[in-house]
Amino acid sequence: MCVKGFRFTSISSACIFARMKNITAHASSLRFDFYSTLVAAVALFAGTSREVLAQGAPMVIRGQEILISANLDSRGEAPRIPPLALGSTAQVMASVGDGSLGTLALDTSTPAGPIEAVPANVNEIMARCQQIIARNPRASIECEPNFLSKKYATPNDEYFPQMYNLKQISAPRAWDISTGSKDMVVAVVDTGIDYGHVEIAQNIFVNSGETPGNRIDDDHNGLIDDYYGYDFANRDSDPMDDDGHGTHVAGTIGAASNNQVGVAGVAWNVSLLPVKVLGQNGWGTNSQIAAGIRYAVSRGANVINLSLGGDRPSAAFYKALVQAMRKDVIVVVAAGNAKRNIDRTPDYPTSYGLDNIISVAATNALDEFSAGYSNFGANTVDVAAPGNDILSLAPGPYLAIGTGTSMSAPHVSGVAAVMRAVNPTLSFAETKTIVMNTVDQRPTLSGRVKTAGRINFARALQGAVNNLRNPPAPARIISASASRSGTVAKISGTVLSRYRLPLAGEWTNLICNGQGVSKEKTGAGGYYEYRFNIARGTSYSCYVEDDRGSRSGQVQVR
Ligand SMILES: [Ca+2]
Ligand SMILES: [Ca+2]
Ligand SMILES: [Ca+2]
Ligand SMILES: [Ca+2]
Protein backbone atom coordinates (compact mmCIF):
# COMPACT_ATOMS: atom_id res chain seq x y z
CA MET A 1 0.00 0.00 0.00
CA CYS A 2 1.33 3.38 -0.83
CA VAL A 3 0.08 6.89 -1.09
CA LYS A 4 -1.58 7.59 -4.38
CA GLY A 5 1.25 8.84 -6.57
CA PHE A 6 1.56 12.07 -4.72
CA ARG A 7 3.46 14.72 -6.61
CA PHE A 8 4.29 16.93 -3.77
CA THR A 9 6.23 20.15 -3.64
CA SER A 10 7.02 21.39 -0.19
CA ILE A 11 7.68 25.07 -0.44
CA SER A 12 8.34 27.82 1.98
CA SER A 13 6.17 30.89 1.95
CA ALA A 14 9.05 32.75 0.31
CA CYS A 15 8.86 30.70 -2.85
CA ILE A 16 5.13 30.08 -2.85
CA PHE A 17 4.37 33.07 -4.98
CA ALA A 18 6.30 31.68 -7.91
CA ARG A 19 4.39 28.43 -7.64
CA MET A 20 1.13 30.27 -7.24
CA LYS A 21 1.62 31.97 -10.57
CA ASN A 22 1.51 28.58 -12.12
CA ILE A 23 -1.93 27.95 -10.65
CA THR A 24 -3.16 31.38 -11.61
CA ALA A 25 -2.15 30.78 -15.19
CA HIS A 26 -4.38 27.73 -15.21
CA ALA A 27 -7.23 29.51 -13.54
CA SER A 28 -7.20 32.62 -15.65
CA SER A 29 -8.10 30.66 -18.74
CA LEU A 30 -11.42 29.93 -17.10
CA ARG A 31 -14.29 32.29 -16.74
CA PHE A 32 -15.18 32.06 -13.10
CA ASP A 33 -18.61 33.43 -12.38
CA PHE A 34 -18.07 32.91 -8.70
CA TYR A 35 -18.47 36.56 -7.83
CA SER A 36 -21.46 37.27 -9.96
CA THR A 37 -24.32 34.89 -9.39
CA LEU A 38 -26.95 34.19 -6.73
CA VAL A 39 -27.50 37.80 -5.80
CA ALA A 40 -29.58 39.13 -8.59
CA ALA A 41 -31.47 42.21 -9.39
CA VAL A 42 -33.80 43.38 -12.03
CA ALA A 43 -33.18 46.57 -13.93
CA LEU A 44 -35.67 48.13 -16.24
CA PHE A 45 -33.98 50.28 -18.83
CA ALA A 46 -35.62 52.76 -21.09
CA GLY A 47 -33.86 53.82 -24.28
CA THR A 48 -31.19 56.03 -22.74
CA SER A 49 -29.55 56.16 -19.37
CA ARG A 50 -31.37 59.43 -18.65
CA GLU A 51 -34.59 57.57 -18.88
CA VAL A 52 -33.62 54.74 -16.67
CA LEU A 53 -36.53 54.44 -14.37
CA ALA A 54 -36.00 51.55 -12.10
CA GLN A 55 -32.46 50.52 -11.64
CA GLY A 56 -32.00 47.57 -9.52
CA ALA A 57 -34.22 45.65 -7.22
CA PRO A 58 -31.43 43.73 -5.60
CA MET A 59 -32.34 40.84 -3.42
CA VAL A 60 -29.80 40.08 -0.78
CA ILE A 61 -30.18 36.95 1.21
CA ARG A 62 -29.34 37.14 4.83
CA GLY A 63 -30.04 33.89 6.51
CA GLN A 64 -33.56 33.13 5.50
CA GLU A 65 -34.52 36.67 4.60
CA ILE A 66 -34.50 38.36 1.27
CA LEU A 67 -33.83 42.06 1.33
CA ILE A 68 -35.31 43.93 -1.57
CA SER A 69 -34.59 47.51 -2.46
CA ALA A 70 -35.18 49.50 -5.61
CA ASN A 71 -33.78 52.80 -6.79
CA LEU A 72 -35.61 54.92 -9.32
CA ASP A 73 -34.38 58.04 -11.06
CA SER A 74 -35.39 61.55 -10.07
CA ARG A 75 -38.75 61.20 -11.70
CA GLY A 76 -39.63 57.99 -9.99
CA GLU A 77 -40.25 56.73 -6.57
CA ALA A 78 -37.60 54.96 -4.59
CA PRO A 79 -39.43 52.29 -2.68
CA ARG A 80 -37.62 50.73 0.22
CA ILE A 81 -38.98 47.37 1.08
CA PRO A 82 -38.00 45.95 4.45
CA PRO A 83 -36.44 42.53 4.80
CA LEU A 84 -38.81 39.99 3.43
CA ALA A 85 -39.22 36.57 4.94
CA LEU A 86 -39.37 33.57 2.68
CA GLY A 87 -42.96 32.80 1.87
CA SER A 88 -44.15 36.38 1.61
CA THR A 89 -44.59 38.64 -1.40
CA ALA A 90 -43.33 42.14 -2.08
CA GLN A 91 -44.37 44.42 -4.86
CA VAL A 92 -42.20 46.92 -6.67
CA MET A 93 -44.04 49.58 -8.66
CA ALA A 94 -42.41 51.02 -11.72
CA SER A 95 -43.67 53.70 -14.08
CA VAL A 96 -42.42 55.30 -17.28
CA GLY A 97 -43.41 58.80 -18.30
CA ASP A 98 -47.00 59.26 -17.27
CA GLY A 99 -48.01 55.67 -17.74
CA SER A 100 -47.64 52.88 -15.29
CA LEU A 101 -45.77 49.79 -16.36
CA GLY A 102 -47.55 47.76 -13.78
CA THR A 103 -46.43 45.87 -10.77
CA LEU A 104 -43.58 43.49 -10.41
CA ALA A 105 -44.37 41.04 -7.70
CA LEU A 106 -41.39 39.38 -6.12
CA ASP A 107 -42.59 36.11 -4.73
CA THR A 108 -40.20 34.57 -2.26
CA SER A 109 -42.36 31.59 -1.48
CA THR A 110 -40.00 29.03 -2.97
CA PRO A 111 -39.46 26.71 -0.02
CA ALA A 112 -36.15 25.23 -1.04
CA GLY A 113 -34.09 27.99 0.48
CA PRO A 114 -31.72 30.61 -0.84
CA ILE A 115 -29.86 28.74 -3.51
CA GLU A 116 -32.87 27.66 -5.47
CA ALA A 117 -35.18 30.46 -4.52
CA VAL A 118 -33.28 33.30 -6.04
CA PRO A 119 -32.85 32.07 -9.60
CA ALA A 120 -36.54 31.12 -9.57
CA ASN A 121 -37.43 34.67 -8.60
CA VAL A 122 -35.18 36.20 -11.20
CA ASN A 123 -36.74 34.08 -13.91
CA GLU A 124 -40.20 35.08 -12.82
CA ILE A 125 -39.35 38.74 -12.72
CA MET A 126 -37.70 38.57 -16.11
CA ALA A 127 -40.80 36.91 -17.55
CA ARG A 128 -42.98 39.65 -16.13
CA CYS A 129 -40.72 42.27 -17.55
CA GLN A 130 -41.05 40.71 -20.99
CA GLN A 131 -44.82 41.03 -20.61
CA ILE A 132 -44.43 44.70 -19.76
CA ILE A 133 -42.27 45.24 -22.83
CA ALA A 134 -44.88 43.57 -24.98
CA ARG A 135 -47.56 45.90 -23.64
CA ASN A 136 -45.44 49.02 -24.20
CA PRO A 137 -43.94 48.56 -27.67
CA ARG A 138 -42.89 52.21 -28.02
CA ALA A 139 -41.21 52.59 -24.66
CA SER A 140 -37.89 51.04 -25.74
CA ILE A 141 -37.49 49.10 -22.55
CA GLU A 142 -34.87 46.48 -21.91
CA CYS A 143 -34.64 44.13 -19.02
CA GLU A 144 -31.64 42.35 -17.69
CA PRO A 145 -30.65 40.78 -14.43
CA ASN A 146 -28.46 43.28 -12.65
CA PHE A 147 -25.97 41.05 -10.96
CA LEU A 148 -24.28 42.30 -7.87
CA SER A 149 -20.88 41.12 -6.87
CA LYS A 150 -19.30 39.26 -4.03
CA LYS A 151 -22.18 37.94 -2.05
CA TYR A 152 -20.91 34.53 -1.00
CA ALA A 153 -19.05 33.84 2.14
CA THR A 154 -15.57 34.58 0.86
CA PRO A 155 -12.79 33.68 3.26
CA ASN A 156 -10.04 36.23 3.75
CA ASP A 157 -7.22 33.69 3.70
CA GLU A 158 -4.24 35.06 1.82
CA TYR A 159 -4.14 32.43 -0.94
CA PHE A 160 -7.87 31.77 -1.25
CA PRO A 161 -8.11 33.74 -4.52
CA GLN A 162 -5.72 31.24 -6.11
CA MET A 163 -7.60 28.18 -4.87
CA TYR A 164 -9.50 27.32 -8.06
CA ASN A 165 -10.47 24.00 -6.53
CA LEU A 166 -12.78 25.52 -3.92
CA LYS A 167 -14.52 27.71 -6.48
CA GLN A 168 -14.87 24.77 -8.87
CA ILE A 169 -16.95 22.86 -6.33
CA SER A 170 -19.05 25.98 -5.47
CA ALA A 171 -17.67 26.14 -1.94
CA PRO A 172 -18.45 29.86 -1.44
CA ARG A 173 -22.14 29.20 -2.06
CA ALA A 174 -22.03 26.24 0.31
CA TRP A 175 -20.41 28.33 3.04
CA ASP A 176 -23.42 30.63 2.95
CA ILE A 177 -25.37 27.65 4.28
CA SER A 178 -22.81 26.19 6.67
CA THR A 179 -19.09 26.03 7.32
CA GLY A 180 -19.34 22.84 9.32
CA SER A 181 -19.25 21.82 12.96
CA LYS A 182 -16.64 20.48 15.35
CA ASP A 183 -19.15 17.77 16.18
CA MET A 184 -18.11 16.05 12.97
CA VAL A 185 -14.97 13.96 13.20
CA VAL A 186 -13.02 13.23 10.04
CA ALA A 187 -10.24 10.68 10.44
CA VAL A 188 -7.26 11.21 8.17
CA VAL A 189 -5.86 7.70 7.88
CA ASP A 190 -2.60 8.56 6.22
CA THR A 191 1.02 9.55 7.04
CA GLY A 192 -0.11 11.53 10.11
CA ILE A 193 -0.88 15.23 10.51
CA ASP A 194 1.34 18.06 11.69
CA TYR A 195 -1.19 18.77 14.43
CA GLY A 196 0.81 21.78 15.59
CA HIS A 197 0.60 23.53 12.21
CA VAL A 198 -0.76 27.03 12.77
CA GLU A 199 -3.20 26.47 9.93
CA ILE A 200 -4.73 23.33 11.40
CA ALA A 201 -4.17 23.14 15.17
CA GLN A 202 -7.60 24.57 15.96
CA ASN A 203 -9.35 21.79 14.05
CA ILE A 204 -7.49 18.84 15.55
CA PHE A 205 -9.61 16.42 17.56
CA VAL A 206 -8.02 15.61 20.89
CA ASN A 207 -8.85 12.67 23.09
CA SER A 208 -10.06 14.37 26.25
CA GLY A 209 -10.09 11.04 28.09
CA GLU A 210 -6.36 10.68 27.69
CA THR A 211 -3.67 12.60 29.56
CA PRO A 212 -0.76 12.94 27.12
CA GLY A 213 2.75 11.84 28.00
CA ASN A 214 2.11 10.05 31.32
CA ARG A 215 2.62 6.56 29.85
CA ILE A 216 -0.79 5.51 31.14
CA ASP A 217 -3.75 4.43 29.05
CA ASP A 218 -6.08 6.77 30.89
CA ASP A 219 -9.16 6.03 28.78
CA HIS A 220 -8.56 2.25 28.79
CA ASN A 221 -8.86 1.85 25.04
CA GLY A 222 -5.74 -0.28 24.82
CA LEU A 223 -3.48 2.52 23.54
CA ILE A 224 -1.21 4.52 25.81
CA ASP A 225 -1.27 8.31 25.46
CA ASP A 226 -3.36 8.44 22.27
CA TYR A 227 -4.11 12.10 22.83
CA TYR A 228 -3.99 13.45 19.26
CA GLY A 229 -4.53 10.08 17.63
CA TYR A 230 -2.17 7.18 17.09
CA ASP A 231 0.73 6.04 14.96
CA PHE A 232 0.11 2.48 13.77
CA ALA A 233 3.08 2.64 11.41
CA ASN A 234 5.65 3.11 14.18
CA ARG A 235 3.48 1.84 17.04
CA ASP A 236 3.76 4.94 19.11
CA SER A 237 1.34 7.50 20.45
CA ASP A 238 2.57 10.38 18.27
CA PRO A 239 0.83 10.64 14.87
CA MET A 240 3.09 13.53 13.78
CA ASP A 241 3.41 13.61 9.99
CA ASP A 242 6.97 12.77 8.91
CA ASP A 243 6.09 12.72 5.22
CA GLY A 244 3.78 15.60 4.31
CA HIS A 245 1.03 13.71 2.51
CA GLY A 246 -1.39 13.48 5.44
CA THR A 247 -0.97 17.13 6.41
CA HIS A 248 -1.77 18.16 2.86
CA VAL A 249 -4.88 15.96 2.82
CA ALA A 250 -5.96 17.30 6.23
CA GLY A 251 -5.53 20.92 5.11
CA THR A 252 -7.88 20.45 2.17
CA ILE A 253 -10.52 18.96 4.46
CA GLY A 254 -10.26 21.46 7.28
CA ALA A 255 -7.48 24.05 7.34
CA ALA A 256 -8.06 27.01 9.64
CA SER A 257 -10.12 29.26 7.40
CA ASN A 258 -11.06 32.91 7.20
CA ASN A 259 -8.11 33.66 9.51
CA GLN A 260 -6.35 35.93 6.99
CA VAL A 261 -3.36 33.65 6.48
CA GLY A 262 -2.56 30.65 4.35
CA VAL A 263 -5.32 28.62 2.77
CA ALA A 264 -8.97 27.77 3.36
CA GLY A 265 -10.36 24.29 3.90
CA VAL A 266 -13.59 22.78 2.60
CA ALA A 267 -14.89 22.55 6.18
CA TRP A 268 -13.93 25.57 8.28
CA ASN A 269 -15.14 23.84 11.41
CA VAL A 270 -14.40 20.16 11.80
CA SER A 271 -12.52 17.82 14.10
CA LEU A 272 -9.63 16.12 12.33
CA LEU A 273 -8.38 12.86 13.81
CA PRO A 274 -4.77 12.05 12.87
CA VAL A 275 -4.31 8.32 12.32
CA LYS A 276 -0.88 7.44 11.05
CA VAL A 277 -0.75 4.16 9.13
CA LEU A 278 1.85 5.01 6.50
CA GLY A 279 5.53 5.51 7.28
CA GLN A 280 7.89 8.23 6.19
CA ASN A 281 8.23 6.61 2.77
CA GLY A 282 4.47 6.61 2.25
CA TRP A 283 4.07 2.86 2.64
CA GLY A 284 2.04 0.92 5.14
CA THR A 285 0.83 -2.64 5.55
CA ASN A 286 -2.78 -3.76 5.30
CA SER A 287 -2.78 -4.70 8.97
CA GLN A 288 -1.63 -1.19 9.94
CA ILE A 289 -4.34 0.37 7.75
CA ALA A 290 -7.01 -1.96 9.14
CA ALA A 291 -5.96 -1.11 12.69
CA GLY A 292 -6.12 2.59 11.83
CA ILE A 293 -9.63 2.27 10.43
CA ARG A 294 -10.83 0.32 13.47
CA TYR A 295 -9.31 2.98 15.70
CA ALA A 296 -11.00 5.80 13.76
CA VAL A 297 -14.35 4.04 14.10
CA SER A 298 -13.81 3.56 17.84
CA ARG A 299 -13.07 7.25 18.24
CA GLY A 300 -16.42 8.15 16.69
CA ALA A 301 -15.33 9.20 13.21
CA ASN A 302 -18.19 10.32 10.97
CA VAL A 303 -16.01 10.30 7.86
CA ILE A 304 -12.76 8.47 7.09
CA ASN A 305 -10.46 9.75 4.34
CA LEU A 306 -8.29 7.13 2.65
CA SER A 307 -5.97 8.72 0.11
CA LEU A 308 -4.13 5.44 -0.23
CA GLY A 309 -4.50 2.10 -1.87
CA GLY A 310 -3.05 -0.69 -3.93
CA ASP A 311 -3.93 -3.50 -6.31
CA ARG A 312 -4.02 -6.38 -3.80
CA PRO A 313 -7.15 -7.06 -1.74
CA SER A 314 -6.93 -7.71 1.98
CA ALA A 315 -9.44 -9.47 4.19
CA ALA A 316 -8.37 -7.42 7.21
CA PHE A 317 -8.75 -4.13 5.35
CA TYR A 318 -12.13 -5.22 4.01
CA LYS A 319 -13.41 -6.26 7.44
CA ALA A 320 -12.39 -2.94 8.95
CA LEU A 321 -14.34 -1.12 6.22
CA VAL A 322 -17.39 -3.30 6.90
CA GLN A 323 -17.09 -2.42 10.57
CA ALA A 324 -17.03 1.27 9.58
CA MET A 325 -20.18 0.74 7.51
CA ARG A 326 -21.97 -0.87 10.45
CA LYS A 327 -21.16 2.25 12.46
CA ASP A 328 -22.54 4.47 9.68
CA VAL A 329 -19.12 5.86 8.75
CA ILE A 330 -18.61 7.26 5.23
CA VAL A 331 -15.26 6.24 3.76
CA VAL A 332 -13.94 8.48 0.99
CA VAL A 333 -11.18 6.91 -1.08
CA ALA A 334 -8.83 8.10 -3.81
CA ALA A 335 -9.30 6.20 -7.07
CA GLY A 336 -5.53 6.14 -7.67
CA ASN A 337 -3.13 7.62 -10.18
CA ALA A 338 -2.21 4.81 -12.57
CA LYS A 339 -4.45 5.96 -15.48
CA ARG A 340 -6.19 2.61 -15.10
CA ASN A 341 -9.75 1.53 -15.71
CA ILE A 342 -10.62 0.04 -12.32
CA ASP A 343 -13.65 -1.68 -13.86
CA ARG A 344 -11.15 -3.98 -15.58
CA THR A 345 -8.14 -3.93 -13.26
CA PRO A 346 -9.16 -3.74 -9.61
CA ASP A 347 -7.70 -1.19 -7.25
CA TYR A 348 -8.39 -1.25 -3.53
CA PRO A 349 -10.15 0.08 -1.52
CA THR A 350 -12.34 1.24 -4.48
CA SER A 351 -12.81 -2.33 -5.74
CA TYR A 352 -14.08 -3.61 -2.38
CA GLY A 353 -17.32 -2.12 -3.72
CA LEU A 354 -18.83 -1.38 -0.30
CA ASP A 355 -21.87 0.89 -0.11
CA ASN A 356 -20.22 3.29 2.35
CA ILE A 357 -17.24 3.93 0.06
CA ILE A 358 -17.21 6.98 -2.20
CA SER A 359 -14.42 6.58 -4.75
CA VAL A 360 -13.06 9.78 -6.24
CA ALA A 361 -11.26 10.50 -9.53
CA ALA A 362 -9.50 13.79 -10.31
CA THR A 363 -10.36 16.89 -12.32
CA ASN A 364 -8.05 19.75 -13.29
CA ALA A 365 -8.36 23.54 -13.23
CA LEU A 366 -10.23 23.43 -16.54
CA ASP A 367 -12.88 21.26 -14.87
CA GLU A 368 -11.93 18.32 -17.05
CA PHE A 369 -11.00 14.75 -16.21
CA SER A 370 -7.31 14.54 -15.24
CA ALA A 371 -6.49 12.04 -17.95
CA GLY A 372 -2.76 12.35 -17.28
CA TYR A 373 -2.88 10.23 -14.14
CA SER A 374 -6.33 9.60 -12.68
CA ASN A 375 -7.75 6.10 -12.46
CA PHE A 376 -11.35 5.78 -13.59
CA GLY A 377 -14.20 3.32 -13.85
CA ALA A 378 -17.75 3.94 -15.03
CA ASN A 379 -18.98 1.20 -12.69
CA THR A 380 -16.55 1.49 -9.80
CA VAL A 381 -15.51 5.14 -9.37
CA ASP A 382 -18.36 7.35 -8.15
CA VAL A 383 -17.47 11.01 -8.65
CA ALA A 384 -14.61 13.36 -9.50
CA ALA A 385 -13.14 16.28 -7.56
CA PRO A 386 -10.25 18.70 -8.15
CA GLY A 387 -6.84 17.02 -7.93
CA ASN A 388 -4.38 19.14 -9.95
CA ASP A 389 -2.13 21.71 -8.32
CA ILE A 390 -4.05 21.77 -5.04
CA LEU A 391 -2.72 24.29 -2.56
CA SER A 392 -2.74 23.06 1.03
CA LEU A 393 -0.49 22.57 4.05
CA ALA A 394 2.89 20.98 4.60
CA PRO A 395 4.59 20.22 7.93
CA GLY A 396 6.87 22.90 9.12
CA PRO A 397 4.57 24.83 8.98
CA TYR A 398 4.54 25.47 5.27
CA LEU A 399 2.16 25.49 2.36
CA ALA A 400 2.51 23.12 -0.55
CA ILE A 401 0.97 22.29 -3.88
CA GLY A 402 0.05 18.67 -4.51
CA THR A 403 -1.40 16.79 -7.45
CA GLY A 404 -3.19 13.44 -7.45
CA THR A 405 -6.44 11.72 -6.58
CA SER A 406 -5.08 11.89 -3.00
CA MET A 407 -5.91 15.58 -3.24
CA SER A 408 -9.37 14.90 -4.77
CA ALA A 409 -10.69 12.59 -2.05
CA PRO A 410 -10.33 15.11 0.82
CA HIS A 411 -12.61 17.55 -1.02
CA VAL A 412 -15.36 14.93 -0.81
CA SER A 413 -14.51 14.13 2.82
CA GLY A 414 -14.89 17.81 3.70
CA VAL A 415 -18.20 18.03 1.86
CA ALA A 416 -19.52 14.91 3.61
CA ALA A 417 -18.48 16.35 7.00
CA VAL A 418 -20.36 19.62 6.45
CA MET A 419 -23.40 17.74 5.11
CA ARG A 420 -23.50 15.61 8.24
CA ALA A 421 -22.99 18.73 10.37
CA VAL A 422 -26.15 20.39 9.05
CA ASN A 423 -27.99 17.09 9.10
CA PRO A 424 -26.52 14.61 11.59
CA THR A 425 -29.29 12.14 10.88
CA LEU A 426 -28.06 11.57 7.32
CA SER A 427 -27.08 7.94 6.97
CA PHE A 428 -23.98 6.95 5.01
CA ALA A 429 -26.29 5.82 2.22
CA GLU A 430 -28.19 9.12 2.14
CA THR A 431 -24.95 11.10 2.25
CA LYS A 432 -23.47 9.15 -0.65
CA THR A 433 -26.69 9.35 -2.69
CA ILE A 434 -26.90 13.12 -2.27
CA VAL A 435 -23.23 13.63 -3.18
CA MET A 436 -23.74 11.54 -6.31
CA ASN A 437 -27.06 13.12 -7.30
CA THR A 438 -25.80 16.68 -7.04
CA VAL A 439 -22.68 16.51 -9.23
CA ASP A 440 -22.12 18.82 -12.17
CA GLN A 441 -21.81 16.55 -15.17
CA ARG A 442 -18.86 17.16 -17.44
CA PRO A 443 -18.31 15.71 -20.92
CA THR A 444 -14.81 14.45 -20.12
CA LEU A 445 -16.10 12.54 -17.09
CA SER A 446 -18.65 10.61 -19.12
CA GLY A 447 -17.61 6.95 -19.13
CA ARG A 448 -14.94 7.72 -16.52
CA VAL A 449 -17.01 7.90 -13.34
CA LYS A 450 -20.44 6.53 -12.49
CA THR A 451 -22.12 9.91 -12.19
CA ALA A 452 -20.18 11.50 -15.09
CA GLY A 453 -19.77 14.45 -12.76
CA ARG A 454 -17.61 16.51 -10.48
CA ILE A 455 -18.91 17.16 -6.98
CA ASN A 456 -20.82 20.35 -6.23
CA PHE A 457 -20.47 21.26 -2.55
CA ALA A 458 -23.29 23.84 -2.56
CA ARG A 459 -25.82 21.52 -4.19
CA ALA A 460 -24.83 18.60 -1.97
CA LEU A 461 -25.23 20.72 1.13
CA GLN A 462 -28.60 22.01 -0.04
CA GLY A 463 -29.56 18.38 -0.58
CA ALA A 464 -28.59 17.59 3.00
CA VAL A 465 -30.72 20.50 4.24
CA ASN A 466 -33.68 19.44 2.09
CA ASN A 467 -33.45 15.91 3.41
CA LEU A 468 -33.58 17.34 6.91
CA ARG A 469 -36.90 18.95 6.21
CA ASN A 470 -38.61 15.97 4.74
CA PRO A 471 -39.37 13.12 7.09
CA PRO A 472 -40.42 14.57 10.42
CA ALA A 473 -39.20 12.99 13.61
CA PRO A 474 -40.34 14.44 16.89
CA ALA A 475 -37.99 16.13 19.28
CA ARG A 476 -37.77 14.47 22.61
CA ILE A 477 -36.16 15.20 25.92
CA ILE A 478 -33.75 12.39 26.66
CA SER A 479 -32.81 13.65 30.05
CA ALA A 480 -33.66 16.84 31.83
CA SER A 481 -33.31 18.49 35.15
CA ALA A 482 -34.90 21.59 36.55
CA SER A 483 -33.60 23.80 39.28
CA ARG A 484 -34.85 26.90 40.97
CA SER A 485 -32.64 29.76 41.91
CA GLY A 486 -34.26 33.04 42.79
CA THR A 487 -36.90 33.62 40.16
CA VAL A 488 -35.11 31.87 37.36
CA ALA A 489 -35.68 28.28 36.45
CA LYS A 490 -33.12 26.56 34.34
CA ILE A 491 -34.01 23.54 32.31
CA SER A 492 -31.29 21.72 30.55
CA GLY A 493 -31.58 18.51 28.74
CA THR A 494 -30.50 16.62 25.72
CA VAL A 495 -33.08 17.07 23.06
CA LEU A 496 -32.75 14.65 20.21
CA SER A 497 -34.42 15.94 17.14
CA ARG A 498 -34.17 15.49 13.44
CA TYR A 499 -33.78 19.24 13.41
CA ARG A 500 -30.50 19.53 15.18
CA LEU A 501 -27.78 22.09 14.69
CA PRO A 502 -27.79 24.57 13.20
CA LEU A 503 -31.47 24.73 12.38
CA ALA A 504 -32.91 23.33 15.57
CA GLY A 505 -32.56 26.68 17.26
CA GLU A 506 -35.26 28.00 15.01
CA TRP A 507 -37.44 25.00 14.96
CA THR A 508 -37.39 23.42 18.38
CA ASN A 509 -39.19 25.22 21.14
CA LEU A 510 -39.69 24.62 24.80
CA ILE A 511 -43.21 25.37 25.96
CA CYS A 512 -43.94 25.82 29.65
CA ASN A 513 -47.51 26.27 30.86
CA GLY A 514 -48.51 27.16 27.34
CA GLN A 515 -45.84 29.83 26.91
CA GLY A 516 -42.82 29.63 24.65
CA VAL A 517 -39.50 29.84 26.47
CA SER A 518 -36.53 31.39 24.80
CA LYS A 519 -33.53 29.20 24.39
CA GLU A 520 -30.43 30.56 25.96
CA LYS A 521 -27.79 28.23 24.73
CA THR A 522 -27.43 25.61 22.07
CA GLY A 523 -24.55 23.32 22.70
CA ALA A 524 -22.96 20.47 20.86
CA GLY A 525 -24.66 17.15 20.44
CA GLY A 526 -28.23 18.39 20.47
CA TYR A 527 -27.95 19.85 23.94
CA TYR A 528 -30.12 22.82 24.74
CA GLU A 529 -30.43 25.02 27.73
CA TYR A 530 -33.42 27.20 28.45
CA ARG A 531 -33.90 29.86 31.08
CA PHE A 532 -37.07 31.63 31.98
CA ASN A 533 -38.56 33.65 34.78
CA ILE A 534 -40.93 31.82 37.04
CA ALA A 535 -43.56 33.07 39.40
CA ARG A 536 -43.29 32.22 43.06
CA GLY A 537 -45.45 29.34 44.15
CA THR A 538 -46.26 28.25 40.61
CA SER A 539 -45.39 24.90 39.16
CA TYR A 540 -44.62 24.53 35.50
CA SER A 541 -45.14 21.73 33.07
CA CYS A 542 -42.91 21.91 30.03
CA TYR A 543 -42.57 20.02 26.78
CA VAL A 544 -40.61 20.31 23.58
CA GLU A 545 -42.39 21.14 20.36
CA ASP A 546 -40.83 20.82 16.94
CA ASP A 547 -41.70 22.87 13.89
CA ARG A 548 -44.43 20.44 12.89
CA GLY A 549 -46.12 20.88 16.21
CA SER A 550 -45.35 17.42 17.53
CA ARG A 551 -44.92 17.51 21.25
CA SER A 552 -42.79 15.31 23.38
CA GLY A 553 -40.80 15.22 26.55
CA GLN A 554 -42.07 16.37 29.85
CA VAL A 555 -40.38 18.11 32.73
CA GLN A 556 -41.80 19.67 35.87
CA VAL A 557 -40.51 22.74 37.68
CA ARG A 558 -41.85 23.33 41.17
CA1 LIG B 1 -5.76 5.44 25.46
CA1 LIG C 1 -2.06 8.90 29.12
CA1 LIG D 1 5.11 8.58 15.61
CA1 LIG E 1 -6.17 29.94 6.66
Image (cartoon, rainbow, N blue to C red):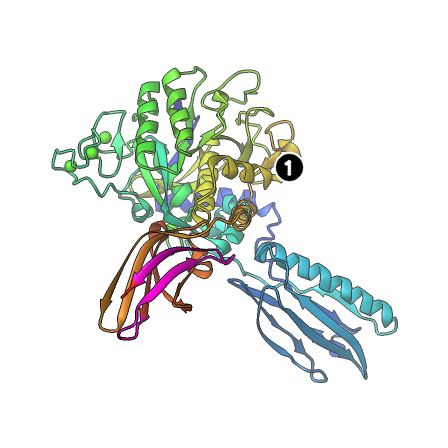
Camera-side residue of 272 and 367: 272
Q: Look at 22% across and 31% down and name the residue there.
A: 221
Q: Position of residue 387 (x, y in %)?
A: 50, 35
Q: Residue 543 colored magenta?
A: yes
Pointer 1 local density, CA inside 10 Å: few below 14, some 14–19, many at least 20 = some
Question: Callout 1, which amino acid?
Answer: Arg
Q: Quadrant of the N terminus?
A: top left
Q: Secondary structure at mark 1?
A: loop
**Residue 262 visible within the image:** no
The image shows residue 183, relative to residue 142, as above or below, that is above
Quadrant of the rendered structure where residue 435 is? top right
Q: Position of residue 78 (x, y in %)?
A: 65, 80
Describe residue 476's horizontal placement relative to residue 274 as left or right.
right
Q: Position of residue 441 (x, y in %)?
A: 63, 38
Seen as rendered, the residue at the extreme right is 137
Camera-side residue of 420 and 264: 420
Q: Residue 493 colored magenta?
A: no
Describe residue 187's horizontal placement relative to residue 448 as left or right.
left
Total of numbered circles in the picture?
1
The image shows residue 119, relative to residue 81, as above or below, that is above
Camera-side residue of 541 and 390: 541
Residue bearing mark 1: 442
Q: Position of residue 483 (x, y in %)?
A: 24, 63
**Residue 25 visible within the image:** yes
Q: Quadrant of the C terminus?
A: bottom left
Q: Look at 36% across and 57% down and name the residue there.
A: 554
Camera-side residue of 421 and 79: 421
Give, as a single range, the part of the protein colored magenta.
533-556
Q: Look at 55% across and 40% down and name the residue there.
A: 434
